[in-house]
Amino acid sequence: MRVTNRMRVQDSLLTIEQRGARFEAVQREATSGKRVDKAGDDPAASARILKLRSGLARNLQFQRNLDTARMRLGHAELSLQRATDQLDEVRSFAVQASTGTWSDEDRTVLGQEVDQLLESLLAEGNRRFLGHSLYAGSQVDQPVFEAVRDAAGRIQLVTATPSGQEGRVMVQLSENEQLQVNFRGVDVFMGGTPGGQADIFDTLIELRDGLLAGDEDASGPALERIDAVISTINGTRASLGTRVQRLDATENQLFSRQELLTDNISDDEDANLADTMMRYTLEQTGYQAALKSISQVMSTSLLNFLS
Amino acid sequence: MASLFGLLDTARSALITHQLALNVTGHNVANVDTPGYTRQRLELGARLGSEQRPTGIGAGVEPIGLQRLRMESFDRAYRREAGGLGESGQRSAQLGAVESLVAEPGDPGISDALDKFWSAWSDLGNEPAEESYRRTVLEAGHRVSARFNQLAGQFKAQREDLNTEVARVGGELNNLAVDLAELNGSIRAAELNGQVASDLRDRRDLLLDDLAGLVDMRAAEDEQGVFRVWVGGRALVDGTVASQLTTSQQAAEDGTVLTRLHWSDSGHEFEVASGELGGLLDVRDRVLPARLLELDQLADTLVAEVNRLHRAGTDLGGRAGREFFDPAGQGASGLALSNWVRDEPGRVVASADGGQGNGEQATAIAQLAETRLAALAGLSLGEAWGTLVSRVGAEAQRAEADYTAQQAFVSELDNRRQSISGVNLDEELTLMLQQEQAYSAAARVISTADSMIQELLQLV
């Protein structure tokens, strides 16, 4: 085919434009480290990357939720520990009182100690932290237990408020998994039945009144009831322990998933730098070769040879 | 007749003719870079000795015509594909712009805003009695709305820009029509005496090339020499008569105003199939409306689903929840927080059972991130957006590939034309040497004849 000057020029210009564009694209990939920047770089991968990123964001969210759950359960554990310690104290008082060697004065003092512990356990039952009530349901602005007091301010009766018992507080740990992080006050402190055998408040009121009245036989039945309460609380702590185990297991899963998602995103999105640098060198060399050949072709003419 | 004076005449014809040939070569050389230039050749013929005795010795050389070296079939092939080039060029540029507007996955966009929105609801679900977490939810909701509003606005703005482009092309078509009609007249006039008006034809061919890039066209010269150009099935130029196009503003179904082109004389709509105009209209009237529809559907579904769950819950004041997003807002441009919750964080719902410590309704809203929705053909909101992004990317990628391929193809066709019509300097210079030598030789013949005549005169 006959070749003209304009053809040479136009072909050279087209080569510069297209090779230049390819070179620029590889440069962009090398400097950004990303294989996929615009959606058109890899349309299918773009949709995948967005989906994986959303998955990763949700995974991080679940990890945050899990930390919240851990904190709540941790506070519940501390509270139950305190309650247990106080109950152990009450128990030892009750044992002492049942030996029958005490004087009326000692019994009065003991009675007052028991009253202090009663107030303390009531406070524990109503304990709040950071705006959350440990033993309420979802009505967190209501008290869990209410005390009826006499003219002297002494507790005569403790009731469980109905609104303070209902509702679950749940934390979302994963797509389909929720964990309840609250405990019903009436279950923990009253064994499920207000005024029943395991009602700690009723037990302590009875014990206190008995000690203050100088009744030697008050502590016997009280011991049985105290044991029932301690057993209930231990049951709660066991349940709490099970929940913490679930948290641990879920946390491991979330962490593995996070690593997997991050890897998947990187596979799609990130440039393989070794590959990119190789293509960079190729394109650069190709571009330079094209420019060189253009300069030689353009400068060769019959005029060079005519005198 | 063979005589010394005849010889002078023969050599004289050679001098004049080769001088003329040199002029033509010079014209070619001068126009080596001129776009659309067709090289010319002087056709030489031996001059007959005399009419009475044509078999005798001839009387030199004479120019018998100016050849214009051009193949019309190559021009037709080029112009067919030039339309495709114009179209793919515009589509590539415009769809690339749409891709940049969508921004993701390179830069944060709607997907990122949605992720943060669901996250805010999830955090509220953990701390349902807190007002500060509600503020975060409102901020995140506002950001999502802003992103949708912005993208829809940008798509609409691009459609407006394309209106301007359509009008521009209309103007260019009008100018081309007028210029072509004028050239047709000039060419007819110049060729009355039988000569070929090569340079004027070159100008016309150049205008036809430009026209081919803008719209699909057909051109032909009939036996009477009348040159016609058809565009969209109708004659744009008929000899020296140029038709014109006018623009009109019409409202589409969705309320946007579109610029349309019409034939001025008949009022009929101007129909195109390819060329730059075809590409512009395809993006303005097919691609952008489709993307806007998908975006609107996404926004409307978001509003419906969030509001549905929000209404089923209880807010911080124990009140039943109302709408979170403005239900009267239509599509992506109308996505906005409702007046009910906008400045009232306490009205953001979190509880499912009425208790302040329960955050299950907020958590349920956060679950919308993964929920497959019937309104989106079984996709989640994130997946539907991802599909939109993927579609935009695939279209842009394909348009660019088409453009690159078309560039190479058209370049090949142009080279084919050039190989016939283009100027090769080496060639012209070689011819110039030849013509110069011929001129020198003819001059030598003259001096030889002259010295022979001198000798004769000396005899007397």
Image (cartoon, helix red, strand yellow):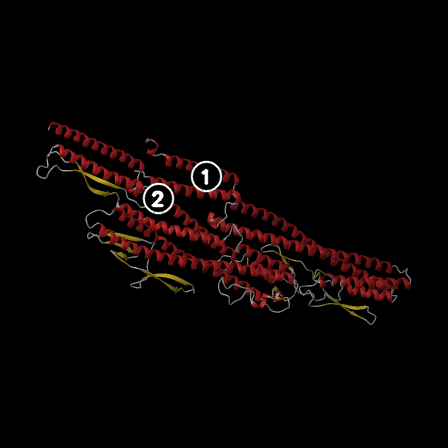
Q: Amino acid at mark 1?
A: Glu
Q: x%, y% of residue B352?
A: 61, 64
Residue B411 — which label? 2
Q: Are marks 1 and 2 in contact (CB under 8 Å)?
A: no
Chain under numbered label 1: A
Q: Are marks 1 and 2 on the same chain?
A: no
Q: Quadrant of residue A150?
A: bottom right
Count residues near mark 2 (Cα–Cα under 10 Å), then give few for <14, some for 14-19, many for 20+: some
Q: Residue at x 51, y 59 (%)?
A: B150
User: Mark 1: which secondary structure?
Assistant: helix
Question: Quadrant of the image for the C terminus of chain B?
Answer: top left
Is B312 on the left-hand or right-hand side of B422? right
Residue occupied by mark 1: A283
Pick the residue in front: B233 or A57.
Answer: B233
Pick the residue in front: B291 or A194.
Answer: B291
User: Mark 2: which secondary structure?
Assistant: helix
Pick the residue in front: A65 or B416.
Answer: B416
Chain under numbered label 2: B
Q: x%, y% of residue A35?
A: 50, 45
Is B106 on the left-hand or right-hand side of B15? right
Q: Amino acid at mark 2?
A: Ser
Q: x%, y% of residue B415?
A: 32, 42
Residue B315 higher or lower than A71, as above or below: below
Residue A270 higher or lower than B457, as above or below: below
Q: Quadrant of residue B59?
A: top left
